[in-house]
Image (spheres, rainbow, N blue to C red):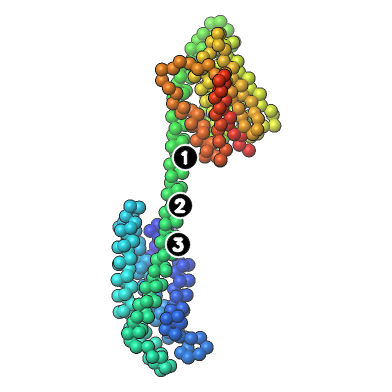
Amino acid sequence: MAWKSNKIGFDDRALVIAGLTLFSFLVPIVFFGWRIGRPPYFGWTSYWPCLVTTSVIWLGCRAIMCWARTRYPLFRDVKKRLWVQMSVILGYVLLVNNVLGPVLFKNCENQMRGAGFRLTPGDIIIESNAASILLTVLVIAIYESIYFVNELRQSIEEKELLKRESLQAQLYALKTQVNPHFLFNNLNTLSAVIPDNPGAAIDFVQQLSKVYRHILEVRDEQSILLKEELEVLEAYAFLLKTRFGDNLDISIRVADELLQQRVVPLSLQILMENAIKHNIVSSAKPLRIDVYAGNEQLVVSNTLQKKHQLVESTGIGLDNIRNRYRLLGDKKVEVEEGPDSFTVRIPLIV
């Protein structure tokens, strides 16, 4: 017998042993009037027939529940399963009790009559069937309650797992989507720098390598040290400054005591890239990006000078950051758009 079956939902050996012991003790006392310390004396002759009958009923009902849950495994079939299960169990309990009971309780009946009991055979049948049905309903209620709680917990865990896998897949798709454009732009910048300043080209390649190495290293991380994220952001800012020159002004100011706190990886790079992507960067309209910390948040703010885009922004980068923070706690990403600036505040994770 599989005690730890997924159709039962838990290892019920302790429940079976305790239940059979307790019910076999209580049924003769509650339903048939046996007593401890006075006639008719409750003893082994009245205990073992009840123990055998209760065991056959309990284990049979358990097998019927496993069969019903296998036959009707889907949630939409729960009502049908319960009706079928209860009907089969009721028939089984009445059959066992009325076939096995008279055989096992014959000695008990003689002892009860000798002690002056006036229970007729009809009374005994009614009492025994009532006891069997009442205790069966109680046991089934316990099993079904535990089964539904386990099913609910499993459903929630599967939903959370699917959510995490979906977010990871979304993040990976975002990286692979952004990186080719990023690489193309930087290769164009590098080809322009090499003829005029080979030394600067070497620095550019080193910083570009640092950014890509970081992307590969943090691919499976949920959070990283702010110090590491800022070091790569400095390299990323160097690439952007080389590309846009004086048309782009980037300021990064974060106190040293905050560097051991954590953020979700690539969040700052994504926010800075969004600022470049959606705003005009030109000599007539230089773009300024400020990165600083305050109130347990890291703030990325840029001047607002939107491009006239034919296609609306999907917001996938910002949504991805929000969703990853949601998995790490109850702190939210705050977004504020004013007449002249666009500001995103991401929580610092202690």
Front residue (pair 293, 284):
284
Q: Which mark is residue 225?
A: none
Q: Nearer the viewer, mark 1 or mark 2?
A: 2
Three-letter amino acid code at the position of disc 2: Arg
**Left-right relation of 273 to 162:** right
Q: Residue at left 47%, top 23%?
A: 179
Three-letter amino acid code at the position of disc 3: Asp
Please state the horizontal and vertical placement of residue 31, each as a whole percent of the image: 42, 81
Q: Which residue is mark 1?
A: 164
Counting other residues with Cα less than 10 Å from the Cα at mark 3, is it few (<14), some (14-19), or many (20 or more)? few
Q: Which residue is mark 2?
A: 153
Q: Which mark is residue 11?
A: 3
* Quarter placement of the C terminus: top right
**1 and 3 marks in contact (CB < 8 Å):** no
Please state the horizontal and vertical placement of residue 326, each as a whole percent of the image: 52, 38
Q: Quadrant of residue 2?
A: bottom left
Give the alpha-carbon distance from disc 1 to disc 2, as whole Å: 17 Å
Please state the horizontal and vertical placement of residue 55, each as a whole percent of the image: 39, 74
Give the alpha-carbon distance from disc 2 to disc 3, as whole Å: 16 Å
Counting other residues with Cα less than 10 Å from the Cα at mark 2, is it few (<14), some (14-19), or many (20 or more)? few
* Quarter placement of the N terminus: bottom left
Is 326 rendered above or below residue 306?
A: below
Disc on the earlier residue, 1 or 2 = 2
Disc on the earlier residue, 1 or 3 = 3
Q: Nearer the viewer, mark 2 or mark 3?
A: 2
Q: Residue at left 65%, top 30%?
A: 294
Furthest toward the front, the residue is 339
Three-letter amino acid code at the position of disc 1: Arg
Please state the horizontal and vertical placement of residue 128, each as a whole percent of the image: 37, 79
**2 and 3 marks in contact (CB < 8 Å):** no
